[in-house]
Image: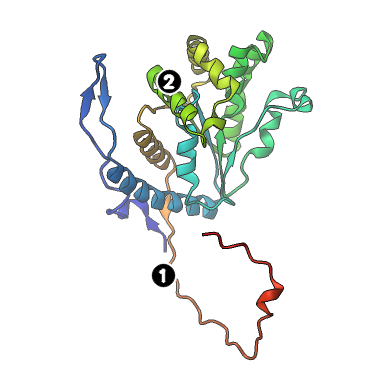
Amino acid sequence: MAKKKNKDKKSSDRPAVTLRDRVDESGRVRASAVPKKVYEEELARLHVELIKLQEWIKARGLKVVVIFEGRDAAGKGGTIKRITETLNPRVCRVVALGTPTEREKTQWYFQRYVPHLPAAGEMVLFDRSWYNRAGVERVMGFCTEEEYREFLRSCPEYERMLVRSGIILVKYWFSVSDEEQERRFQARIDNRTKRWKLSPMDLQSRSRWVEYSKAKDDMFASTDIKQAPWYVVNSDDKRRARLNCISHLLSLIPYQDLTPEPIRLPPRQEDKGYVRPPMGDQTFVPEKY
């Protein structure tokens, strides 16, 4: 028997974490950083709710698309990882397309994204999406003015078509300040395991900050539609951004708790004369640790 989400008083109905604000040196009010312990407790709770959502999507055959856009180092990738780390990759998958091939450049612009859309019972997270045309392609001159204008005209209709087909479309824009992006870029430079995250396009985005801001404003003006609105995530605090984004996503899709009854493992099959092959016939990984 399905249990309604609102009956789970210990998890889904818990009040959101609220922390006192602080004023920085420039006089701007900033929310205090989320303590690590609070963050981990809330994330663990939200992971349980995400699993409930996953099972509901699978059971009801829902088709969900979540788009993550924003400036470089805004925290999109980290949020996506926190969403997917406890989910079944057969139900929830990530799409992060690279540079289009020469053949793809000659296709209808949205064509390369269509094969990655979900079937029934699936949720797809786009780590950047068709909005590349309104952002990096526009600013860096990788598309013509005519192609850009056509995108702004056709994108709302394309997304309305997706929604009419039964797809639940959610769009997030991760907003990061100039100062915080600078700090994160420097951290990537200093960390050998994160240097790969700094591409030539990332460095260009620093020198064209205002151009990217204007491109984002124009994109919102044309594509922030009723059927698929943009939701802005303040991401100067990564922990807060992740919690807020996951919590908001859960609030957009009504779901019920389909957690099964406690599982009991059956007894293991009896041996009945089984003889294991000699250990020397197998190749083992060297135990260096």
Q: Which residue has dot 2 on it?
A: 182
In the image, 242 versus 111, the foreground residue is: 242
- Farthest residue, direction front: 288
Percent across and percent down for residue 31 are 27, 28
Percent across and percent down for residue 60 are 53, 52
Q: Identify which residue is drawn at 49% across, 39% down.
A: 80
Q: With respect to residue 255, does 102 lie above or below?
A: above
Q: How many numbered discs sit on the rendered protein?
A: 2
Q: How far apart are marks 2 and 1 (CA)?
A: 49 Å
* Dot 1 amino acid type: Pro
Circle on res. 262 = 1
Around disc 2, counting alpha carbons within 10 Å, would you say few (fewer than 14), some (14 to 19), or many (20 or more)? some
Q: How is the image coloured?
A: rainbow
Q: Is residue 28 left or right of residue 160?
A: left
Q: Identify which residue is drawn at 26% across, 17% down.
A: 28
Q: Identify which residue is drawn at 66% across, 31% down.
A: 98
Q: Identify which residue is drawn at 51% across, 34% down.
A: 194
